[in-house]
Amino acid sequence: MANLVRQLGQRSLNIVQEAGGLMIFLLESLGLAFVPPFRPRRILQEIYQIGVKSTLIVMLTGAFTGMVMALQGYYTLKQYGSEGALGSAVALSLIREMGPVLTGIMVSARAGSAVTAEIGIMRITEQLDALDTMAVNPIQYVVMPKLLAGVIAVPLLTAIFDVVGILGGYLVGVVLLGVSSGSYFSSMAQSVVPLDVNGGIVKSLVFGLTIILVACYKGYHTGAGAEGVSRATNQTVVLSAVLVLAWDYVLTSFFM
Amino acid sequence: MVKIINLVKSFNGQKVLDGINLTMPTGQITVVIGKSGVGKSVLLKHIIGLLKPDSGQIIIDGHDMSQMGGRQLREFKRRFGVLFQGGALFDSLDVFENIAFPLREKTRLPEAEIARKVRFRLAQMNLTPEVETKLPDELSGGMKKRVALARAMIQEPEIMFFDEPVTGLDPPMTNTVFHLIGKTHQESGYTALVVSHDIPEVFSVAHQVAMLHQGRIIAAGAPEEIQNHPDPVVQSFIRGEVDFLEA
């Protein structure tokens, strides 16, 4: 029994320690964004790596999400004779919830894991140490541009996800199932208010920061060898997906 | 002058460095020898400020590095050049960009001057201009080491650190790297610390040799003194005898 309590206590301490480490890492990285050199070229390169390279997978996910939501929504709404509200249902679900959350999870799987692997390999091959000995702050050179890129790219990817999802819903709802094009878009225009869009943007900003922060932190503090990098990559995907869902609940309750 | 005073470091309760005392005279090459895993690289990482000691001091030209932190420590490191064990070249940059990196980051030199310095260092390392556009993955082990040495030397450091500079290289390339260390030292006159277990090749560049064993420096002196040292542990290591306790 005493052993169980000890293990539980140790685990709790580890979680608090990890959370504290993440916060210090975040503050240091963001603080360095305001200290020259500002490295705009590095930030653009990272926007390309994290954002542009995730566009296709985000568009595919968005299209199928919109399509399946239109399919489910159509048969549910039809029971109440409200097929005309399909556009509204698809758009609100995408803009408020599905867009930010699924974009976050896709970015974490594609770019988050890549960021952890890249920084982890730099750690185990002493490239981060090399930067340090050249009087270049590794957090400012490697981490800060990735964090800023995440904050910029994820909201843009979410917007792409929402638009493609709405078009996917249009394809199924209007083209395949025969809902009128006018009611699809007019119900959308009537029900979506600026608060929905703003809420989606705030969520995607927070998710972008969280995913890339976790990815950089895990890579920066990776264990030794290939196994250490593999474990860190795995932890990044799991932890950032869980944090995205947890943040989603907190932010949704805030916006409701 | 670099002076290490009573340096102690433990990892998970195990003492790796147990009161190291060592002086690296200015303008000379000090070689630290010892078996693999004895803590040579840990010692080097303390001197270049990558690790903080549990206790003890590292005095470089009167400044205690173990008391420095943050930006002050980072700026102090501008006097250093480090050749890491695996080269630590940046994967995403080609050879030219790797060597030019410290100059582009830390100086405002025009690109033409940077290119001139990079090509001078490449030639010094017997590397042809064709390698400039190659990525580190496309280089052999020996070429990587020479490119890394060129990058470490590009800012003309006052103190050079070499962490196992010839590990994994064939005998001709081992001799080439040691020859380059000797040659660059003659030309620049830097103070250097070489961490290595490559006996006897490493004696060719050393002015002073120190042997690390069980967390302590058990012998230090001129190469000839160490080669004739009466301590059986030193003699056993130099002769490369089988360590029955470990075998």
Image: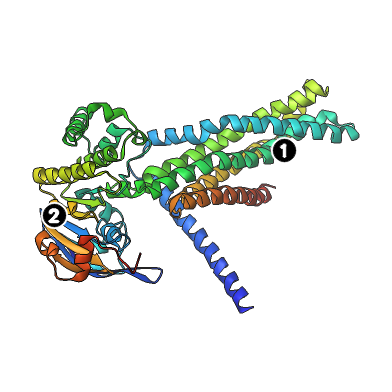
Q: Position of residue A88 (x, y in %)?
A: 76, 32
Q: Is residue B6 visible?
A: no
Picture residue at 50% right of the left edge, 47% below the top: A215
Picture residue at 13% right of the left edge, 51% below the top: B204
User: Closer to the camera, B112 or B32?
Assistant: B32
Judge whether B33 appears above or below A160 on screen: below
Q: Is residue B12 left or right of residue A205?
A: left
Q: Are marks 2 and 1 on the same chain?
A: no
User: Closer to the camera, A53 or B67?
Assistant: A53
Judge whether A165 appears above or below A130 on screen: above
Q: In the image, which disc is placed on residue A93?
A: 1
User: Closer to the camera, B52 or A155?
Assistant: B52
Chain of residue at mark 2 = B
Q: Residue furthest bottom?
A: A2
Q: Quadrant of residue A67 in the image?
A: top right
Q: Is residue A23 visible?
A: yes
The kind of residue on which mark 2 rests is Ala
- Between the C-alphas of marks 2 and 1, the distance is 71 Å
User: Closer to the camera, A88 or A104?
Assistant: A104
Q: Position of residue B67 (x, y in %)?
A: 26, 64
Picture residue at 23% right of the left edge, 27% below the top: B129
Judge whether A175 appears above or below A135 on screen: above
Q: Position of residue A64 (x, y in %)?
A: 70, 31
Q: Quadrant of the N terminus of chain A?
A: bottom right
Viewer-side label of 2, 1: 2
The kind of residue on which mark 1 rests is Ser
Residue on which disc 2 sits:
B206
Q: Is residue A147 left or right of residue A194?
A: left
